[in-house]
């Protein structure tokens, strides 16, 4: 991985420049082998304020450029993502521990998110109507001002792109707070945005943890906060940001249920369920976490067990993010075992030769889980699937509906009627039919229900246009007549 540009120590990026400081730091590790790769500053409220001031200074010029002019920068930026694909992919891999293929898919998705942003001039067309003789009403979408975006560790490149292209193309300026665990991908983004011609101050990076997030929520000059992370922190951020009268969308954790019916295609279903639970080492908010096996599905479960044999930790199965995460996942498996569940495939105590310092958990399938067990209720965020047996579809849907999360749910069946029931009755924002990871592609928007998302609207796609803008309504009168009525 010698061809990657890494920053050591990682610095904040404010007003178009990297900022040297003597803040306390946190070590950044490569989770694939446990080696130290950099340090990240733990910034404070003054650093946030510096970034907000830079963003506020950049806002008047940036927001009064035309949409088409702003878009040109993101055409260039998308090309730079493509040109630097290999390097960006290796950077994600280095700091997150996922496989090369998974990291590359992430950067490709970032390009798709830019493609949506550059199509905004085709979508954001202001409205105008002559409402009575000589009197026109128009609605224009205007940016909000300085906005903030806070991201988690599991998609260091893609999740920041859920917000950066749309928010900036729509005329806002931004303060970004990446996860302190994976701060390096956003450093490269800042460099590439500048190379694409983004004016100084439009995009600013403040590294750190809780203190930065709290300062963002409290800062009086930030108009909107978008957050992606765990439900625990999403609740804190949503409450704190809205208590200072900001708009906020806060995406939280997940516990996605896949309902498998006995008529499902066994090969396709088994491979989809296994891929969904193990992709990115299970550290996806769209990962399968519970499989509800309806009636006679033993043949599909047997096939899943078989399929896990092709998953090789350190090769096509990446690491989890930290030693503490590995310990937490293994604790959940132990609890399930102690509670009487049957471990069909056990990923505990996995090590990889030559990468003994890495944090690996092998694929894990737990059968005969009951709804009261911790593995049935809580987010595990590892390559683990819990199988709950249900007698019929009604019971399966009831189990899915019982979760306090609601990011995704999927059904595997050959029956249109059964699939339709799940589409209608599952309590989740994103539904899959014979698809294990039902991520909506642009222009469809991304966002869950229940405790998987707080706030109105979704974070990407058309829905995000509403979040990043406010409507200005203007009524004009151009008829020369003196006579007035209620409309004039
Ligand atoms: P996290 O909640 O620990 O951290 C997310 C962000 O919040 C980070 O930038 C972190 O610095 C900050 N933070 C952490 N603790 C804080 C606190 N007490 N106060 C204020 N800020 C705090 O999440 P994570 O471990 O980085 O990411 C994994 C979680 O993210 C999982 O729960 C996963 O489901 C979720 N996630 C959800 C989605 C979605 O679309 N719903 C997408 C990706 C990840």
Image (spheres, grey):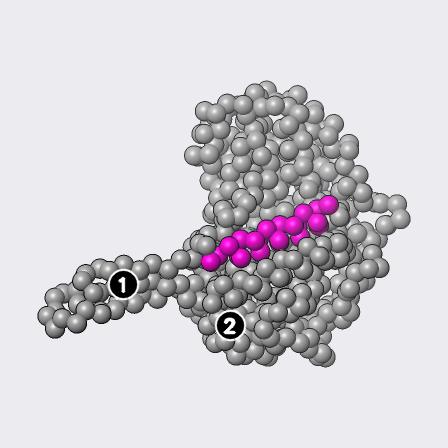
Q: Identify whether 363 is placed above or below 269.
A: below
Taken as a whole, is the magenta stretch helix, strand or loop? helix
- Mark 1 or mark 2: whose residue is earlier in sequence: 2
Q: Which residue has dot 1 on it?
A: 137
Front residue of 285/202: it is 202
**Residue 297 in picture, x, y percent from top left:** 61, 22
Q: Quadrant of ligand 1?
A: bottom right
Quadrant in which the C terminus appears: bottom left
Query: Which element type, helix, strand or loop, lies under badge 1?
Result: strand
Look at 46% across and 40% down and name the residue there: 427
Indicate left or right for 64 with 272 as reference. Answer: left
Indicate left or right for 354 with 359 as reference. Answer: right
Q: Can residue 246 be seen in this view?
A: no
Query: Residue 65, labelled with which disc?
Result: none
Let me know if residue 291 is in the magenta part.
Answer: no
Look at 56% across and 20% down and name the residue there: 263
Indicate left or right for 237 with 355 as reference. Answer: left
Q: Which residue has dot 2 on it?
A: 62
* Range of residues picked out in magenta: 101-121
Front residue of 487/275: it is 487
Let me know if residue 116 is in the magenta part.
Answer: yes
**Residue 156 in picture, x, y percent from top left:** 66, 57
């Amino acid at each position: 991985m010698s061809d990657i540009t890494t920053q050591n120590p990682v610095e904040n990026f404010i007003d178009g420049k990297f900022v040297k400081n003597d803040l306390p730091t946190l070590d950044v590790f490569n989770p694939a082998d446990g080696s130290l790769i950099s340090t990240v500053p733990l910034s404070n409220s003054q650093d946030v304020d510096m970034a907000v001031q830079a963003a506020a200074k950049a806002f008047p010029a940036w927001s009064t450029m035309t949409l088409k002019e702003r878009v040109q920068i993101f055409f260039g930026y998308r090309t730079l993502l493509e040109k630097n694909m290999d390097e960006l992919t290796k950077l994600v891999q280095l700091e997150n521990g996922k496989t090369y293929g998974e990291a590359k898919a992430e950067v490709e998705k970032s390009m798709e998110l830019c493609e949506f942003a550059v199509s905004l001039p085709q979508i954001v067309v202001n409205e105008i109507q002559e409402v009575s003789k000589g009197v026109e009403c128009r609605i224009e979408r205007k940016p909000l001002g300085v906005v903030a975006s806070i991201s988690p560790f599991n998609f260091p490149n893609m999740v920041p792109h859920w917000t950066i292209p749309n928010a900036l193309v729509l005329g806002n300026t931004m303060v970004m707070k990446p996860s302190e665990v994976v701060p390096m991908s956003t450093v490269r983004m800042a460099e590439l945005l500048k190379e694409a011609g983004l004016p100084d101050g439009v995009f600013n990076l403040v590294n750190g943890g809780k203190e930065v997030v709290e300062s963002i929520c409290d800062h009086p000059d930030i108009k909107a906060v978008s957050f992606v992370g765990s439900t625990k922190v999403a609740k804190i951020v949503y409450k704190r940001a809205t208590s200072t009268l900001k708009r906020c969308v806060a995406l939280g954790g997940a516990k996605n249920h896949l309902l498998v019916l006995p008529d499902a295609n066994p090969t396709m279903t088994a491979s989809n369920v296994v891929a969904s639970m193990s992709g990115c080492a299970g550290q996806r908010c769209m990962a399968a976490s519970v499989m509800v096996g309806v009636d006679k599905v033993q043949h599909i479960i047997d096939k899943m067990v078989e399929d896990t044999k092709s998953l090789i930790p350190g090769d096509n199965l990446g690491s989890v993010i930290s030693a503490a995460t590995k310990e937490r996942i293994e604790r959940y498996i132990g609890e399930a075992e102690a509670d009487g569940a049957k471990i069909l495939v056990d990923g505990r105590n996995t090590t990889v030769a030559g990468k003994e310092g890495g944090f690996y958990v092998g694929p894990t399938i737990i059968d005969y889980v009951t709804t009261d067990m911790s593995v049935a209720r809580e987010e595990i965020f590892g390559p683990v699937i819990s199988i709950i047996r249900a007698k019929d579809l009604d019971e399966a849907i009831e189990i899915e509906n019982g979760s306090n999360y609601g990011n995704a749910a999927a059904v595997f069946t050959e029956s249109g009627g059964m699939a339709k029931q799940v589409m209608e009755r599952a309590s989740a924002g994103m539904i899959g039919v014979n698809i294990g990871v039902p991520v909506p592609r642009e222009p469809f928007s991304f966002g869950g229900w229940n405790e998987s998302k707080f706030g109105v609207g979704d974070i990407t796609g058309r829905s995000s246009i509403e979040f990043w803008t406010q409507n200005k309504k203007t009524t004009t009168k151009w008829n020369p007549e003196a006579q007035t009525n209620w409309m004039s």
